[in-house]
Image (cartoon, helix red, strand yellow):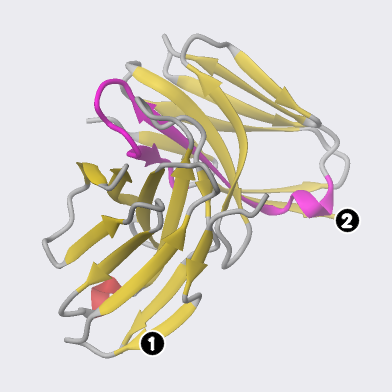
Amino acid sequence: KQEVTQIPAALSVPEGENLVLNCSFTDSAIYNLQWFRQDPGKGLTSLLLIQSSQREQTSGRLNASLDKSSGRSTLYIAASQPGDSATYLCAVEVSGGSQGNLIFGKGTKLSVKP
Amino acid sequence: KAGVTQTPRYLIKTRGQQVTLSCSPISGHRSVSWYQQTPGQGLQFLFEYFSETQRNKGNFPGRFSGRQFSNSRSEMNVSTLELGDSALYLCASSSRGANTGELFFGEGSRLTVL
């Protein structure tokens, strides 16, 4: 059974700092991995999608990497800003017949202090 | 391009009642997934529809049901509400067919059961 873990559960950093959020999964047979952002009381915003054949994806100040063999992904945020404060979730899609069923981690709650 | 729209945004029901939630996907998206989010369990997959057919179902009791219409709009219904059904219900759409691809979420419907 696929399990997704995100460490740490919460993180507080000063503005301008570069930071890394971690995501690990137990079964390497994934189709893709997606990072999301969720603001309080809101829905999820897709940040980056990494296909299983890819090693990383970049969008602006965000860079996500994927290492299937070790069951790990990291989300790197450069030059953090107070507006980056939110909960960050990673989710994997298991290979083979799991349409729509993403397995989510519990998230990392990020607070960026001005 | 309009995003995923969910209605209603907030609703309060009492135990034993039933509720219907609606989701309009991004134009052109034929896959719609539903998730339940609670503080304790995080995000859990309910079901996924593609071209009016349920392709995948999560581990929820039969009180939770859904359907999809020919215009890809989807509804989910919860009958005989219980206190534990209080949650944020999120709908997501995807343009992919064979697998999920990138998921785009709505703002959610916050259900409170008294």
Q: Chain of mark 2?
A: A
- Determine which residue is flagged by label 2: A114
Q: Amino acid at mark 2?
A: Pro
Q: Find residue B68 and name its label.
A: none
Does A6 appear in magenta?
A: no
Q: Is label 2 or label 1 in front?
A: 1
Query: How far across and down, in percent of the image, does residue A40 sit?
Result: 60, 64
- Which span of residues is magenta-colored? A81-106
Depth check, front residue: A12 or A83: A83
Q: Is residue A40 left or right of residue A15?
A: left
Q: Chain of mark 1?
A: B
Judge the density around disc 2: few (<14), some (14-19), many (≥20) Cα neighbours within 10 Å: few
For label 2, the SS is loop
- In percent of width and height, residue B82 lies at 20, 79
Q: Residue at x 13, y 60 (%)?
A: B61
Identified at 37% across, 48% down, the residue is: B33
Task: Report whether A20 appears left or right of B49.
Answer: right
Residue at mark 1: B12
Going by the image, does A64 lie left or right of B37?
A: right
- Tell me, yes or no, whether the highlighted magenta stretch contains residue A100: yes
Q: Who is closer to the viewer here, A97 or B23?
A: B23
Report the residue that reaches farthest toward the front: B70
Q: Secondary structure at mark 1?
A: strand
Q: Residues within 10 Å of mark 1 (few under 14, many from 20)?
A: few
